[in-house]
Image (cartoon, rainbow, N blue to C red):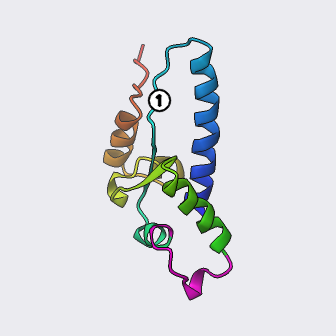
Amino acid sequence: MALRDTIKEALYLSGILKWLKNEQLGISLPNIIPVLTDSKSARKLVENPEFHKRSKYIDIAYHFIRECIREKKVKSVFVRTIDQLANGFTKGLSKHKHDSFIEGLNLQRPKSS
């Protein structure tokens, strides 16, 4: 379900950026939006069109994701959990992982006065 919500948000933001690009703001956009996930199970469900007993109540969401992948609007890219940058927003991190998170977002610590 998180993959579906991420794809919906990515398509929405892409639409806004395409509109801004049309307003001559010089934004370059990828043709296919990469959506990073650390869930092998979710990727298998969306990439394999077979019916799965455990997914019968959420199959509409997977049809939406499959359609987006088939139409090359997005692509699902596997990222190891340890390398998943989004974890910094949802999990408590050790100092080392927090520093990697800050670096991955291209943020800088405030300079002490």
Q: Please tell me which residue is depicted at 62% across the width and 45% down the height of the picture.
A: 9
Q: Could you tell me residue 94's position as x and y percent?
A: 37, 51
Q: Residue 41 or 62: which is nearer the viewer?
A: 62
Residue behind mark 1: 29
Label 1 SS: loop
Q: Residue 27 or 82: which is nearer the viewer?
A: 27
Magenta-tinted stretch? 46-57
- As displayed, is residue 84 above or below residue 104? below
Q: Could you tell me residue 75's position as x and y percent?
A: 44, 52
Q: Is residue 80 left or right of residue 49?
A: left
Q: Residues within 10 Å of mark 1 (few under 14, many from 20)?
A: few
Q: Could you tell me residue 64's position as x and y percent?
A: 62, 61
Q: Is residue 74 left or right of residue 99?
A: right
Q: Please tell me which residue is depicted at 31% across the width and 46% down the height of the picture.
A: 96
Amino acid type indicated by mark 1: Leu
Q: Could you tell me residue 38's position as x and y percent?
A: 41, 61
Q: Residue 111 or 51: which is nearer the viewer?
A: 51
Position of the C terminus, as image quadrant, is top left
Q: Please tell me which residue is depicted at 63% across the width and 34% down the height of the picture.
A: 15
- Residue, far front: 71
